[in-house]
């Protein structure tokens, strides 16, 4: 067990260290400074901007910026919806995959357009190679870049002084795509191929096993998908079991770099904030606050999964290597738990073990990660969620010391607080009301086990499956308690809407907020100002996150995972 | 509005070609040149060129002269993969675990506490190519008996096929079942009794 803790600690420390470097690079890219790899990627950036027909010097205010963001996403949605619903007749379909059913396609395309990557289909049977390339990979790049663009614009607004324009959406989008995600994805894909991830246009391999049975082995353009799925906090796997599949994640070393690539950009976003607004200490406080939530969750999750399943131990089988249902030998319980916590705090949603089979309290960690949704968070958006909590913490702290709340020298007034509250409250509203509706439908259907056939597991765990699905959709996470039979119109349409609203409300509201704050003049800080870059503020922020972010979910946590734990 | 739609469309088309097409084609080319075997799926071919499997994908073994992989929730179907998704307290799950435990203790003639957790649980994708060294040790006596070779000979092969954690601390020590079985076939002549 000791080795596993070493591996967990090493992975986290390595990621933190490298995020400092990447954060600096990102700040250089988004403030228009020159970087080392410009000679290769700047020409591609120019090509894309020319192809789009955008004048890179044309600045936008927050309304124009949001409008460009929304319209680009609408077009992407329509184009990719067309591809998956027509894939049967399109090329690059060696395994003869049929067209996607409309409600499933609505769910899938909404899922990938919102950077959620909730999957009600299984890649090996549901998508052609063309769809994997021109729908999945394409959206995994550009939606991650959309999140980064929104975050960059928000930061500009917050750091601005009488600033009307917050940048050009297409310039930010293109830069994030071409100069951040593309280089990293290329390097990571090559690394994964070296480790054993396939990259082929040929159809399933037809193997005849040593005992003479036929075993078709699905494969495809896997390396190209896995890298960007990890880097862009997308999480949508090539195969149903995601990075638990040996082709997506063949070795402990591939697992290490894939775990790294989940958090590297979300962590670097915080570092970037420090450089962009010229306040490194503020970035340090935010980073430390996030770690103060993340690390205890990892430690607790690893301990739970490494502890094994007492029900199986009671039968006499050895549980010294932990709870191994749904987990892979090459990773073990410890690195599976690290991944599970990391992928849910960051809204990535890829998995290297089946969360549905985790121990009850271990499985509570991914839920908490999605309920908070801001501990590093999704690329861009998680960081924006954190900024909302920062604004609220500033407001609370201001109330406590009896002064007008200020952040970075800007007065935070009623209008901004309303926007922050909207972004903050939509999240629990969608999760709790969605789960309540699902429970109501289940409870009022005669013989739901046969009529609906949603739940794989009885009792509190069945409730957790429904709760997890709404949490995952709303948080734009995409992982699942996959025992849920979720490819039905109810779940396809319901969670499809939850994903769309759970994406665009928390993007547009903060953009508006940043736009409003950006126009305000920045007052010089005095001894009476609230210092957001102090340890005291960090602690306040931490408390606000836990109290506001988690308390509302206490009742459902008790009904699901905690009730199940008590039954162990 | 029209101008926004047109921009969105042009951006979508441009980046779709770049990221959906050029990106994948470029990587495919690199795979062909640098990692030809991995890129096609780490397939293992027999002497006559037929594919016997992939070193990364578990296949089903039931005969006594072969080591067995972990149980699979999808019966080792590598074209439709998945885990059981059973919760830890699900009675169906616990029943399945109990049945596997009984089957193994009978087949290998060992006590339940000698059976590693991995051998009574299904993996995430149902295709886990590895078993822990303890699970190979557990099966060695049965395999040796079925093949009519000394136990130490089989143990030697298991040891030779045990991969330690990467760099000594990343991941778990493990044995690749298909590779071990191929090696068994290649290096140990099968006795007439087994051939039946």
Image (spheres, grey):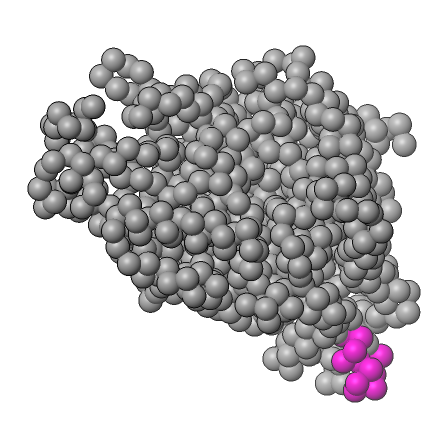
Q: Which residues are drawn in magenta?
A: A394-404
| Image spot of residue A277 (x, y percent) | 67, 61
Q: Nearer the viewer, residue A293 or B145?
A: B145
| Image spot of residue A500 (x, y percent) | 79, 44
Q: Nearer the viewer, residue B128 or B106?
A: B106
Considering only vertical position in the picture, is A60 above or below A461? above
Q: Is residue A148 visible?
A: no
Q: Main secondary structure of the magenta part?
A: helix
Residue A415 occupies quadrant: bottom right
Residue A122 occupies quadrant: top right
| Image spot of residue B103 (x, y percent) | 36, 47
Q: Which quadrant is the C terminus of chain A positioned in?
A: bottom right
Q: Which quadrant is the N terminus of chain A positioned in?
A: bottom left
Q: Residue at x 80, y 34 (%)?
A: A74
Q: Is residue A398 magenta?
A: yes
Q: Nearer the viewer, residue A67 or A493?
A: A493
Residue A117 shown left or right of residue B52 in the figure: right
Q: Residue at x 76, y 74 (%)?
A: A394
Considering only vertical position in the picture, is A530 above or below A521? below
Q: Is residue A19 magenta?
A: no
Considering only vertical position in the picture, is B129 above or below A286? above
Q: Is residue A387 visible?
A: yes
What is the total number of numbered labels drawn onto the structure image? 0
Q: Nearer the viewer, residue A438 or B3?
A: A438
Residue A384 shown left or right of residue A324 in the figure: right
| Image spot of residue A2 (x, y percent) | 33, 67
Residue A117 shown left or right of residue B22 in the figure: right
């Amino acid at each position: 067990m000791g080795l596993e803790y070493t591996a967990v600690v090493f992975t986290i420390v390595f990621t933190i260290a490298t995020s400092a470097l990447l954060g600096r690079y990102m700040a250089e890219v988004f403030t228009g400074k020159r970087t080392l790899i410009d000679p290769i990627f700047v020409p591609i950036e120019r090509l894309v901007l020319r192809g789009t027909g955008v004048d890179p010097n044309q600045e936008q205010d927050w309304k124009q910026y949001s409008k460009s963001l929304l319209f680009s996403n609408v077009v992407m949605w329509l184009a990719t919806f067309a591809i998956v619903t027509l894939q049967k007749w399109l090329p690059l379909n060696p395994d003869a995959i049929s067209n996607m059913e409309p409600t499933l396609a609505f769910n899938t395309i909404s899922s990938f357009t919102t950077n959620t990557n909730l999957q009600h289909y299984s890649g090996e049977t549901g998508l052609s190679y063309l769809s994997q390339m021109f729908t999945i990979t394409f959206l995994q790049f550009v939606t991650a870049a959309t999140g980064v663009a929104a975050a960059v614009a928000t930061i500009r607004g917050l750091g601005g002084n009488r600033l009307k324009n917050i940048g050009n959406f297409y310039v930010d989008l293109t830069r994030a795509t071409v100069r951040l995600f593309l280089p990293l994805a290329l390097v990571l894909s090559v690394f994964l191929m070296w480790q054993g991830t396939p990259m082929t246009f040929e159809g399933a391999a037809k193997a005849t096993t040593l005992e003479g049975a036929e075993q078709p082995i699905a494969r495809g353009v896997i390396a190209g998908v896995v890298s960007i799925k990890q880097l862009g906090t997308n999480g949508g796997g090539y195969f149903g079991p995601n990075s638990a599949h040996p082709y997506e994640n063949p070795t402990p070393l591939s697992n290490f770099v894939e775990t790294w690539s989940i958090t590297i950009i979300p962590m670097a976003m915080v570092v970037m904030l420090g450089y962009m607004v010229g306040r490194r200490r503020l970035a340090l406080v935010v980073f430390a606050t996030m770690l103060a939530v993340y690390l205890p969750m990892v430690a607790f999750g690893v301990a739970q999964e490494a502890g094994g399943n007492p029900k199986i131990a009671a039968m006499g089988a050895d549980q010294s290597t932990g709870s191994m249902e749904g987990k892979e030998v090459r990773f073990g319980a410890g690195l599976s738990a690290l991944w599970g916590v990391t992928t849910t705090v960051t809204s990535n949603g890829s998995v290297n073990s089946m969360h549905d089979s985790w121990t009850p309290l271990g499985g509570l960690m991914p839920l908490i990660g999605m309920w908070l949704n801001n501990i590093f968070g999704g690329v861009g958006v998680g960081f924006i969620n954190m900024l909302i909590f920062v604004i609220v913490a500033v407001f609370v702290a201001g109330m406590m010391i009896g002064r007008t709340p200020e952040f970075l020298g800007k007065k935070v007034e009623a209008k901004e607080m309303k926007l922050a509250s909207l972004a903050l409250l939509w999240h629990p509203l969608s999760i709790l009301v969605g789960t309540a509706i699902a429970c109501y439908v289940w409870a009022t259907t005669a013989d739901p086990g046969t009529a609906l056939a949603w739940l794989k597991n009885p009792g509190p765990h069945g409730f957790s499956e429904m709760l997890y699905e709404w949490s995952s959709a709303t948080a734009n996470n995409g992982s699942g308690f996959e025992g849920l039979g979720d490819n039905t119109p109810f779940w396809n349409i319901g969670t499809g809407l939850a994903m769309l609203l759970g994406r665009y409300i928390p993007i547009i509201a903060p953009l508006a907020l940043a736009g409003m704050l950006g126009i305000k003049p920045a007052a010089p800080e005095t001894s009476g100002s609230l210092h957001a870059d102090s340890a005291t503020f960090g602690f306040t922020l931490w408390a606000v996150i836990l109290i506001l972010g988690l308390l509302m979910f206490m009742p459902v946590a008790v009904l699901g995972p905690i009730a199940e734990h008590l039954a162990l | 509005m029209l101008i926004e739609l047109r921009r969105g469309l042009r951006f979508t088309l441009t980046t779709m070609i770049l990221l959906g097409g050029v990106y994948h084609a470029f990587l495919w080319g690199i795979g062909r040149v640098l990692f030809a075997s991995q890129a096609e799926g780490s397939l293992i071919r027999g002497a006559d060129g037929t594919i016997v499997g992939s070193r990364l994908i578990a296949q089903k073994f039931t005969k006594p002269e072969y080591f067995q992989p972990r149980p699979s929730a999808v019966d080792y179907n590598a074209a439709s993969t998945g885990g059981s998704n059973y919760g830890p307290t699900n009675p169906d799950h616990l029943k399945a675990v109990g049945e596997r435990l009984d089957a193994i203790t009978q087949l290998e003639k060992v006590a339940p506490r000698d059976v590693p957790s991995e051998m009574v649980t299904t993996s995430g994708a149902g295709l886990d190519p590895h078993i822990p060294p303890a699970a190979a040790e557990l099966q060695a006596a049965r395999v040796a008996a079925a093949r009519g070779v000394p136990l130490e000979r089989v143990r030697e092969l298991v040891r030779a096929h045990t991969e330690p954690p990467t760099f000594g601390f990343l991941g778990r020590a493990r044995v690749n079942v298909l590779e071990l079985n191929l090696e068994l076939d290649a290096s140990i002549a099968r006795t007439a009794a087994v051939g039946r």
